[in-house]
Image (cartoon, grey):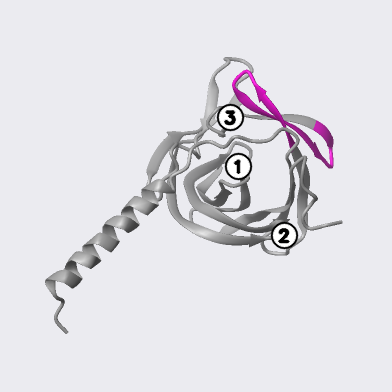
Amino acid sequence: MKTTIKAKAILIAVAMFTVLSANAADVMPPVLTPGSTYEFQRVDGFTGIEKQHWTLTFKGMKNGKYAYDGINNEGNYKFFQNKDLNSFAVNKKTGDITEYQIFKWPLTVGEEHVYQDRIGPVTVSVQATEKVETKAGVFDTYRIKRNGSWYSDETNRRGPWQEVCWYAPSIGSFVKIESSYADLLGRRYNWVKTELIKYTTPDTQPFPAN
């Protein structure tokens, strides 16, 4: 079948609208509500056995950083993310800061960047938007993938690692993370899956309900 000029014009208009809609969906760092609580579970990807369980409660912005109270099997702790919602590490000897730059705002499908961690370069790519079901509910997310390398001082072994994160703008948090390491022969190990299992705000009931 031949496509008429009018039909072509309609197709072009639809394509333009799709692009504009995608751009309109680009998001900036979240504005979180103090008292919002995120409960996570991490399991072994091979066996399904729980490896870690923790809860973070957002307390507010402190010195331009997102500040949380955390609790896990080892007790209470403090957790911070910088103004871009990225985690970071501070070298206690030198004061140097390493930012794990997962986010570069605005968040846009197709965006790719590289940052440097302790071992080497890490490539981050925003791959797609996806609807993801978790124990805490169903979320519209951005799927973000990281690829890097690892090295063990103790065993003198090295290899590649990858991590896929699903970020939900509606709650300002990852709702799923899956990561794994491999040796130089490509054999995967240390495969872990993290999932949000409960999310509450000060004016809502927990889901799932107790």
| Residue at 77% over, 60% down | 49
Where is 181 relative to 34, above or below?
A: below
| Residue at 60% over, 34% down | 31
Is disc 3 in contact with disc 2, using a CB cutoff of under 8 Å?
no
Q: Quadrant of the C terminus?
A: bottom right
Q: Position of residue 172 (x, y in %)?
A: 60, 42
Label 3 residue SS: strand
Label 1 residue SS: loop
**Disc assigned to residue 172:** 1
Determine which residue is flagged by label 2: 135
Q: Which residues are magenta?
A: 57-76
Q: Position of residue 190 (x, y in %)?
A: 64, 53
* Residue 65, magenta (yes or no): yes
Q: Residues within 10 Å of mark 3 (few under 14, many from 20)?
A: few
Instruction: Give the mark, 1 or 3, whose residue is nearer the N terminus.
Output: 3
Left or right, 175 with reference to 74? left
| Residue at 12% over, 70% down | 5
Q: Residues within 10 Å of mark 1 (few under 14, many from 20)?
A: some
The secondary structure that dominates the magenta segment is strand
* Residue 9, magenta (yes or no): no
